[in-house]
Amino acid sequence: MTEIAKDRSMEIQKEMLADHYRRLEDAPKSGEPVVYTFVPGNLNELVRSFDALPVFPEINALQSAMRGKSAGYIATAEKAGHSEDVCSYVKCDVGMARSGNVGPTGTRLPRPDLLLLSYTGCYTFMKWFELLREEYDCPVVFVQVPYQGDGSITPGHRAYVARQIRETVIPALERLTGKPYDEGRLRESLARSARAEEDLVAVFESAMRRPSPIDAYFGAVYYVGPIFSAFRGTEEGAEYYRTLREEVEERARQGLGPSTPSGVLTRQKYRLVVEGPPNWTHFRDFWKLFSDEGAVVVASTYSKVGGTYDFGFRHDMEDPLGTLADYCGGCYTNIDLPGRVRMLADYVERYSADGFVIHSVKSCNSFSAGQLTILREVEKRTGVPGAFFESDLVDPRYFSPANLKNRLESYLQMIEARRGAAAR
Ligand code: SF4
């Protein structure tokens, strides 16, 4: 596997993650309650205001894949009867649970005391927790977040979600932890979230510069790690984003590009926008295909799965439950196809991209359905050609490096040819 130079923020994040997993391993002894929940539409600030520890099954799956463990877990789940067509995140998680529930960093994960199903957009999340409920026989709380079927969050949607949080989630957390709801504590946490979100947006928007000091897809996977998971709303999360922003601003001042598997990518020949989640089993090799060609990603939709902050949303301490409802409704997986087309076209234009790539993953219907239509629409609106690549999230059987390399090379040659034609 190709290694990349580690930025200081990456080292900090690694420590944060390791600490969190150690705390989770100790939870049966320390008595800290454990809540399993999902990334898009999570209520992390609320969960942590009750001193409960969150576990994110998708994060475990992708981290397991990056460490080469997902193939075995998927095989275990398939032997237990899960079809090849089931989302590979789910199979990876089920396989991990049936193999002793040892998390990606090698520490054992505790059983959930509560399954908090506050997903957005994808029905698979519900089936996933049905499986975990059978596995662990523990209580489940379901928050239904209405899909943005007509492209917006209506006041009715907002009130509906806020009511569920007030009437169902908070009482369940009170029962679980034996603590009363502390709105003051939640407000403080939301204020820290907003600070971190402000810093993260500054990091994303630095990609408008030439050269871009960040890679907004592969590199962004590291940038969004804490805010997508256990650290949104925490002191250490806010501190991480302050450090990250300083690091990126310093790189921009020096006119440097991001650290990539091909070294510091300052000479950037192609600026791309990417739609769809990455492949995790060959993450660095996948990234290297791009960085070897001098291609930097300047904006991506995957980095908005845990919140569309660059379109203005910030958690608002003045309206704790309303803001949590808005957050849930606004995650990328909750946005309809026209909204996704608008977002991609906006990125292509605002970030002056040479092209856009759709990485379509076999596992994820939520992301992949409609992507060919998205491709055609974004091409039509921007006049910029798109490319369509296919592999998977955490199932290594669907990653074909030679095929992806060929496609990427042909695509970049096409961009080159168009440049030549435009210059004549
Ligand atoms: S299908 Fe996609 S959105 Fe749904 S759980 Fe799997 S990876 Fe997540």
Image: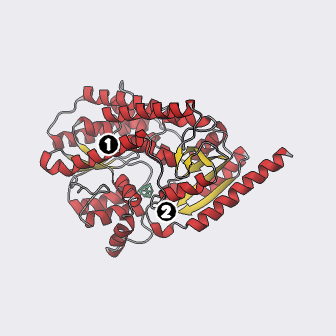
Front tag of 1 and 2: 1
> Residue 270 versus residue 313: which sits nearer the camera?
270
Give the percent coordinates (x, y) of residue 55: 29, 49
Counting labels gives 2
Give the percent coordinates (x, y) of residue 279: 49, 58
**Which residue is at the far top?**
318
* Residue 332 visible in rendering: no
Q: Residue at x 48, y 38 (%)?
A: 153
Q: Residue at x 36, y 32 (%)?
A: 239
In the displayed structure image, the side of residue 315 where residue 355 appears, left or right: right
In this rendering, is residue 249 above or below 353?
A: above
Q: Residue at x 78, y 51 (%)?
A: 418
Q: Specify the label residue 386 is tagged with.
A: none
In which quadrant of this rendering is ligand 1 seen? bottom left
Q: Which residue is mark 2?
A: 392
Q: Which residue is mark 1?
A: 16
Name the residue type under label 1. Answer: Met
Q: Residues within 10 Å of mark 1 (few under 14, many from 20)?
A: some
Name the residue type under label 2. Answer: Asp
> Residue 284 versus residue 79: which sits nearer the camera?
284
Give the percent coordinates (x, y) of residue 328: 41, 41
> Residue 278 versus residue 115: which sits nearer the camera?
278
In the displayed structure image, the side of residue 419 where residue 311 appears, left or right: left
Specify which label sits upstream in the sequence, 1 or 2. Answer: 1
